Image (cartoon, rainbow, N blue to C red):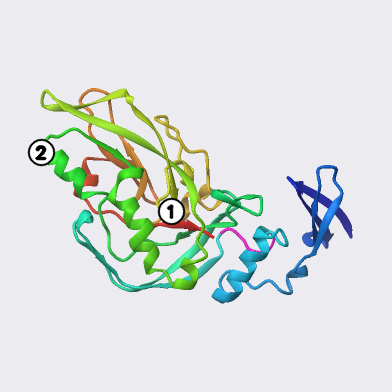
Amino acid sequence: MSIYINNKKNIKNIFANVNGEKKSITSAWVNKNGVPTKVFQKKDMMDDIVSWSDATDEQLFNLLNSHYKGEINLADYWHVGDERVVHLSAMPADSNLNNEFHEAQDIILVIIDFNKDILSSPINDINKAAITVHLKTCLNTTGIIDLSYANAYSSNQSFGASWHNCARREWCNNTFKNSLPNSLKQMIKIVKKNSGYIYYTYDNDHYTVNKNNIYDTFTNDSCFLLSPIEINHNISENDYDFIRYEYYINNSHRKEIRWWLRKPYFNSYDNAIPGWWDVSTSTISKCGSCFFVNSRGIAPAFCL
């Protein structure tokens, strides 16, 4: 059995290599000189760690609490692709989303990565959320991005489109979040997300986009849609996000139906077609003007 140490900021994790498998043994807070100031016993050799799928909400709360105290790293025990069934309560109709309504349903939450999303406020000097989870399949009802965009587009008005000001973001952070069980909802961590803003100017019977009206926006979200880069797609225009979730390195993990991402797009600076990104197993595409009226799958993500 070999022992080795992994230093991360002011946390020192000590591991043992047992039969080729890394096992966490102890964790210690250390000062800047490397001297341990507080030592924790690990929840060792998996004995006290229940799986993501089997943990009760109380056990889940305690495990997350241990993670954020630096006693364990959940990535040592759970795996990308692990699944958990959760029941959602019914979600009321939303007039900003064309009166979209969702019945009560069971969903599968799949772990898509560990220690990836930046927390809006650090917890015990830990800056990244323990896990990020995503709906394995879309909700039973499809939907649009924002009805107000449709109204502006149909009346030939100039308008700005972005994740930060769209009705779908409001719905994710409120209506969807509130459909989760209370015990799980209380464990959700607010994280920083990036998205692009595009202002579409209508003049002389067509839309144009000025380079000065394209920029990044940053939001603090409890629940959110994913971005093109987060699902491992390279885009050339406004590459604002640098997170790539491990689960989506495998393109076959994308949903079978077309589902919304959280980024607007334009096809050219002159004669621009306003649009929004969507994706399916076989393709990722720019949905020109259809994000006003066409329905796509809805699959929020969140961090714990």
Callout 2 secondary element: loop
Residue 46 versus residue 206 in the image, above or below: below
Residue type at mark 2?
Ser
- Coordinates of residue 137 in the picture (x, y in percent): 40, 62
Q: Nearer the viewer, residue 143 or 27?
A: 27
Which quadrant would the C terminus be assigned to in this image?
bottom right
Give the mark, 1 or 2, whose residue is nearer the N terminus: 2
Label 1 neighbourhood size at 10 Å, few (<14), some (14-19), many (20+)? Answer: many
Q: Nearer the viewer, residue 282 or 118?
A: 118
Residue type at mark 1?
Arg
Q: Image check: 199 left or right of 228? A: left
Label 1 and label 2: CA atoms lie apart by 35 Å
Residue 141 versus residue 36 in the image, above or below: below
Q: Image check: 70 left or right of 137? A: right
Give the quarter of the image for residue 78.
Answer: bottom right
In the image, residue 210 lies in the stretch drawn in magenta: no
CB of mark 1 within 8 Å of CB of mark 2?
no
Give the quarter of the image for residue 101.
Answer: bottom left
* Rendered image: mark on residue 18: none
Instruction: State the residue position of label 2.
Output: 155
Instruction: Inspect this view and state whether residue 246 appears.
Output: yes
Instruction: State the residue position of label 1.
Output: 254
Q: Which residues are magenta?
A: 76-80
Which quadrant would the N terminus be assigned to in this image?
bottom right
